Image: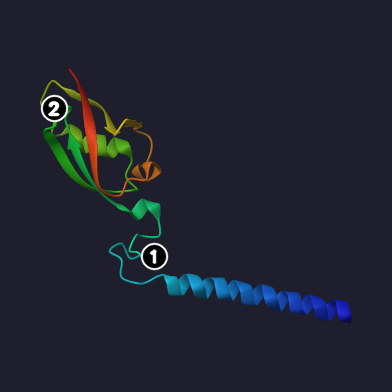
Amino acid sequence: TAPAAAAAAAAGRRQRRRRHRFLRKYHLARRGSRSGVFESEHGAPGCPEEVPVDLRVRLLSGAVLSELAAHGGWTVSKAIALTQQQVQPGRKLAWLQVGFQRLEPHEMLAKYKLEGPTEATAVLVE
């Protein structure tokens, strides 16, 4: 019966650990995010796809082409499509880049860890 008692004690410890982890996670989160998901203590949403991104797209000349209120769940191609609407007829937006990093159209903005106000550069072709 000693092994049975040890097994029961171990099961009780596992259950208490699981409950403690849940409660700790619950108390570190607070309600009230805009998207309806829990936010961490510092205010960033718990899910990278929900992180707001204020994307300001500039031309190589420095002129502002567009400003988008996006979130990490957007694909780069969606941001490109919305920015393309602001481009002069006869020109096409080839790609967006942040700093020296080219944003791939099939990727999500969350992959690039963009958050808050972000400056992107639009590369146009004729």
Q: Quadrant of residue 31?
A: bottom left
Q: Quadrant of residue 91?
A: top left
The front one of 43 and 5 is 43
| Quarter of the image with the N terminus in it | bottom right
Question: Of helix, strand and loop, which one carries label 1?
Answer: loop
Q: Is residue 9 left or right of residue 80?
A: right
Question: Of helix, strand and loop, which one carries label 2?
Answer: loop
Q: Amino acid at mark 2?
A: Ser
Identity of the residue drawn at 40% across and 60% down: 46
Above or below, 95 relative to 29: above
Residue 106 is situated, as x and y percent measured from the top left of the image, at: 37, 34
Above or below, 48 relative to 111: below
Identify the residue under disc 1.
40
The front one of 89 and 53 is 53
Residue 119 is situated, as x and y percent measured from the top left of the image, at: 23, 40
Identity of the residue drawn at 37% across and 67% down: 41
The front one of 24 and 82 is 24
Identify the residue under disc 2.
61
Q: Is residue 38 left or right of residue 58?
A: right
Q: Amino acid at mark 1?
A: Ser
Q: Tell me the CA gap for discs 1 and 2.
A: 39 Å
Residue 23 is situated, as x and y percent measured from the top left of the image, at: 51, 75
